[in-house]
Amino acid sequence: MKDYLQFYINGEWVDPAAPRTIEVENPATEEPFARISLGAKADVDKAVAAAKAAFPSFSQTSVEYRADLLEKIAAGFQARLGEIAEAISDEMGAPMWLAQAAQAPIGLGHFANTAAVLRNYQFEEMKGTTLLRKEPIGVCGFITPWNWPANQIACKVAPALAAGCTMVLKPSEIAPLDAMIVAEILHEAGVPAGVFNLVNGDGPGVGQALSSHPDVDMMSFTGSTRAGVLVAQAAAPTVKRVAQELGGKSPNIVLPDADMKKAVGGGILTMMTNSGQSCNAPSRMFIPREKRDEAIAIAKATAESVKVMMPREAEKGAIGPISNANQYQKVQDLIQKGIEEGATLVAGGPGRPEGLNRGYFARPTVFADVTNDMTIAREEIFGPVLTMINYDSLDEAIEMANDTEYGLASYVQGPPEQAAEVGKKIRAGQVVLNGAGIDINAPFGGFKMSGNGREWGVHGFEEFLEVKAMIGAG
């Protein structure tokens, strides 16, 4: 059992105001392997005070200084990439191949890319006789989730540093260890004392105190829509900016002329990656009714080819466990709900895969003949569960795709021009056409109950800037 009982505040590792610990569990074994401290309002107050004190000087540093700092952080991140991947695998169950290929490297990517964004950004612009200036918003509070922990930390911390902001991070108490490594990397890179602070804890103890703190100018939250509402409510009395990246129930429209094997098979594999624990996962697949039988056969074969393995032993393409006991039970309950509501179970189902008698492992599951009013078509399952919905016309497919409270991501597969036209009609912050890979410069964020604000690239950087108009300057 490893202990990580201190917080990083004002450039030092310090003890919590009051001792209170929680065990970090490995979801593949259901065994605790580390302990962290849970913070409280007193710890948040101390961290925010440090960030507030550091802001006047850090906000005035040069672009070159901050860009160099980000590149030093990226170098430190690169040096500890393997260690970060191992921490992520142990704390949230990502198979090592995924932790090494995506979970850890994307965090590195955000630090390196943000340095380039910063070097090319124009902070001042003349409009007639008015000078428009972009200035850092101030002290930022960050609450990050367990499903892509290094990614979500980096795509908040990197642009905030680039903008000249100071910050307090509360990582998920389920997956906190990679955040501790990131704090060490920032310290070694020479981030000035007070600029970055880390307080571990839960939502009621730390998240609430951070969101409602009068000296925090902005909250950036990633997590469930339910928790996002609580953050916004806590933040409202102090009228701070709130950026939220919340839940999703992303549609994947397979057009009639799509390559069915590629579209359906690829859609299944994308959905199952990270055990379905991605807010932008293509969880609702819309299939032309006349292609139903063909699509089901492809879906069944593809889902049954997905191996479920222990994270440290997993081969490429295999998935690991659900991240924690509560989420595992939610996934199991929703699979059972799909059966009870009359959807056709194509692959998978309740319970653990054969040969795995311990750990929060779920079976790769596909339902067909789902109607858009069923629970499994409405609620974000956040597990390896895909629903297939038949449509009779493209207009009907688009209407059903938009018939959701969410609007984070969407997918369209078929002839490129037609796919692009359909994509324009979907109310979501991101449309992925024909299985395109990620673009780290493309803005990421949602419509409707999927949140507000954007992350990644220039748009993510600008979330941390305020606009000042200096009238008569020219």
Image (spheres, helix red, strand yellow):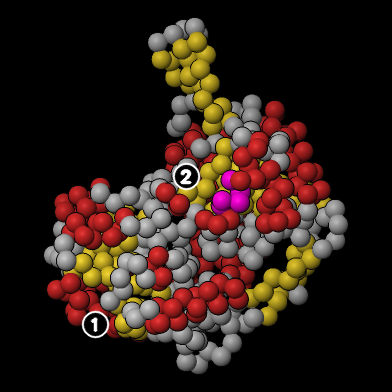
254 to the left or right of 161: left
Residue drawn at 70 percent across, 28 percent down? 57
Which percent across, then down, holds residue 95?
51, 74
Q: Secondary structure at mark 2?
A: strand
Q: Residue at x 47, y 44 (%)?
A: 452
Q: Nearer the viewer, residue 28 or 311?
A: 28
Q: Is residue 150 left or right of residue 17?
A: left
Q: How dense is the environment of label 2, judged by Cα within 10 Å: few (below 14), some, or many (20 and up)?
A: some
Whichever of labels 1 and 2 marks the residue nearer the N terminus, that label is: 1
Residue at 26% x, 66% y is 286
Image label count: 2
Q: Which residues are magenta?
A: 228-232
The reply to whether residue 44 is in sight is yes
Q: Residue at x 16, y 51 (%)?
A: 417
Residue 427 in the image: state x and y as whole percent.
33, 49
**SS majority, magenta:** helix
Label at residue 297? 1
In the figure, 453 relative to 149: above or below?
A: above
Residue 77 location, x and y as percent?
Answer: 59, 54
Instruction: Look at the image and tell me in which quarter the N terminus lies.
Output: bottom right
Report whether residue 110 is seen: no
Residue on which disc 2 sits? 452
